[in-house]
Image (cartoon, rainbow, N blue to C red):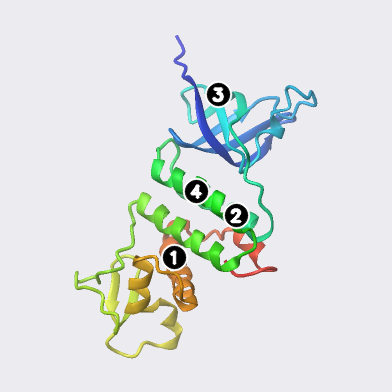
Amino acid sequence: MTKRTQEWVSGLVLHTRPYRETSLLVEAFTESFGRVSLVYRGAKSTSGKNNKARLLQPFQPLTFLWQGDRELKTGTKVEPAGAGFLLFGTALYSAMYLNELIVRLLLKEEPHPVLYRQYIQTLGLLKEVQQDNAQIEIFLREFELTLLAELGYELVLDMDASFTAIDADLHYAYDPEAGFNVAFKKIDPAFNRMLFSGQQLLAISQQQWQDAETRKAAKRLLRLALAPHLGDKPLESRQLFKPLTKS
């Protein structure tokens, strides 16, 4: 007898792509199961009642019903579960960036309730500010910090690699594998992107974002920290920011 699972699950669509003529492959981020892959057969039916494609859109809270115990499950039903996050401009591109990070970095069917809550909260904050670039940068950095912690690579920002407290008056070179080492000697300018002041590291650790230089340093640091996990393939969503602003 074929084993089947079937239950309603809260979540949001991260990404969809066509499958055959009328179906959709859906990547969803769910509260209980983490990232899940679903196929909704006939989702693009022209029938109004059966057109699930209208619902299977990013940034819309949904409840999914699926069956199957394989990695690719069969979606059977989907229902709205509240007001969606209407985003545009920089806020929309930022949310797409979050989605791409989740798809690229989370293993399937591993629950991440803390990150899920952070994701919902971040979408709500992006909806509120829309084009406030400084605030958007803060929200992205906080999500990235949470994501790294959930992956088991939490940044230790108040101690260096020798377990000595970070000194606000010193500078530190970042090593993605070891952490931060005191930069006693002058570092070649080609490697300055790896260099951070102790003051900046302590401000990031306490999420004190008032200073623009701290926000810039946090962006640089988080890119360095995420790079080994993302591999050589560039993030497509980052290209969207170029005409508007640097994310």
| Disc on the earlier residue, 2 or 3 | 3
Residue at numbered disc 2: 128
Q: Secondary structure at mark 1?
A: helix
Name the outermost residue toward the right. Answer: 46
Please give the label number shown on residue 121: 4
Q: Amino acid type of disc 3?
A: Leu
Residue 153, above or below 41: below
Q: Secondary structure at mark 2?
A: helix
Residue 112 percent across, percent down from the top left? 40, 42
Residue at numbered disc 3: 65
Residue at numbered disc 1: 222
Contact check, label 2 and label 3, Cβ < 8 Å: no
Residue occupying the point 37% across, 49% down: 150
Residue 239 appears left or right of 197: right
Q: Amino acid type of disc 1?
A: Leu
| Disc on the earlier residue, 4 or 3 | 3
